[in-house]
Amino acid sequence: MLDCFTTSGERARPLHVIAAAAAGPWLEGRPARWRAWLEGIGYRAQPGNGALLPGPDGAPEAALLVVGERPSPFDVAAAYARLPDGDWRIETEGAIEPAVAALGWALGSYRFDRYRKVEPVVRRLTLAGGAESRTATIAAEAVFLARDLINTPASDLGPAELAVAVEEVAGRYGASVRTLVGEDLLEQGYPAVFAVGHGSPRTPRVIDLAFGDAQAPQVTLVGKGVCFDTGGLDIKPAANMLLMKKDMGGAAVALALAQAVMALDLPVRLRLLIGAVENSISGTSFRPGDVIRTRKGLTVEVGNTDAEGRVVLADLLAEADAGRPDLIIDCATLTGAARVALGPDLPALFTPDDALAEDLLAAGRGAFDPLWRLPLHEPYREMIESKVADIDNAGKGGLAGAITAALFLKSFVSETGAWAHLDIYGWSQSDRPGRPKGGEASALRALIAFLERRFAA
């Protein structure tokens, strides 16, 4: 159980979560000292407003949070930040779903303290147990895993360490893991992954996790695991390189999603494929103008070495597609173009399947983790045509970069109709309740909700 939760609630103080429309009548039936205190501080019962409520001795004996018509986990995360230490229990008064409240509490508690001393927060929520508490805990643990991996600098998280992280998760749930390293990638048919990672002394890897009943519907998750991206020989400016430890964010989200699927014991045959590489600069780095052969047999002209993620994903998607699973989902911190179009908080969703798109969008709305669908506009494919190879990894003209990247990936998925590509940012730009500045599990809660709805027994 996460440190922010407890099952012992004997001394837990209540946090009353009240709908704004019901706040007035609710307060009328409460102790006079509460009403006097709130009147004295000028409290207004508006969504987002909270207050501590005094006991007979003046010390806080309870707290109040007023919410709107559709409260989110981040309402409770904001309340968490304002409460004093101690044990609390949430009295929802019907204003918020218990699972939403518990998830918000957990998200508010997240800290990344691996490299600096942080004052401990002893603030715990009493869980009543049951399916809702279990789901919230699993979702929070998955978010924490992804955030921790993204926040870890490349000095401590290269391809080998990412493989260890997968093995640790697999070990907890009895999943199997097969890892191909270095020259084995060429022998086993992953030439594109090898080409991208060959410029680094930290050898590239393909990590392949499997879990579940072989007769169950097969779900294959694919993650871009570029543990650091210099841009390669088409080197990035210094300012653009500062956050490149997060370029394995797709792999972090895919691994966290796999963990949640196993923890929820969804009746699926799960497969996770991660290409773990470092895009470095050396005498063995791949070059602009090179032609790379891929697992699918298609050849790729390197128009830009800083468009390496899609080259890694090409081999992984070809392998995923060859198994003809019921569903493929890939996650990648793929393009700056998606961020320019949608900003840091809206992952771009691409899929040729309209029904799948609507299910994913609905799951995102329900999980307070929205996605935005962008088109796989086939006429733009001419932007990634090559005169010397089957396809170019970098679009011409500098326009529609997220779409041309998605079209590139689509070239490697021909047997599986239910495929979705998530172009994520993997980072929170500023400190907000439940979303601290740093690594973020973009689209993860939406994907967990989607898979629960589609496959839960």
Image (cartoon, helix red, strand yellow):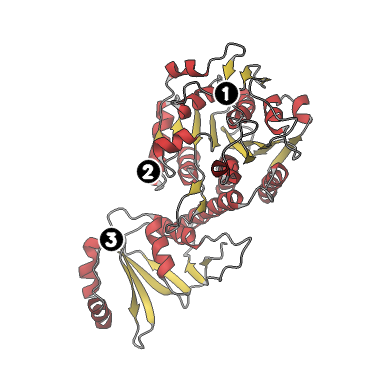
Q: Residues within 10 Å of mark 2 (few under 14, many from 20)?
A: some
Give amino acid for label 2: Arg
Tell me, yes or no, if residue 189 can be seen here: yes
Q: Disc number at residue 94?
A: none
What residue is drawn where x is 27% and y is 54%? 69
Could you give the CA–CA distance between mark 3 and mark 1, rounded to whole angstroms? 48 Å
x 25%, y 63%: residue: 46
Q: What element carries label 2?
A: helix
Which three-letter amino acid code belongs to the residue tagged 3? Pro
| Among the two numbered marks 2 and 3 on one chain, the one whose residue lies closer to the N terminus | 3
Q: In terms of sequence position, does the residue under pointer 3 or pointer 1 come before the other?
A: 3
- The count of marks equals 3
Q: Position of residue 39 (x, y in %)?
A: 22, 77
> For the residue marked with disc 1, what is the amino acid?
Asn
Direction front: furthest residue: 237
Within 10 Å of the Cα at label 1, are there few (<14), some (14-19), or many (20+) other Cα atoms?
many
Residue hosting label 1: 393
Given residues 84 and 169, the one toward you in this image is 84
Question: What numbered label is drawn on residue 365?
Answer: 2
> Mark 2–mark 3 contact, CB under 8 Å?
no
Residue at mark 3: 47
Quarter occupied by residue 348: top left
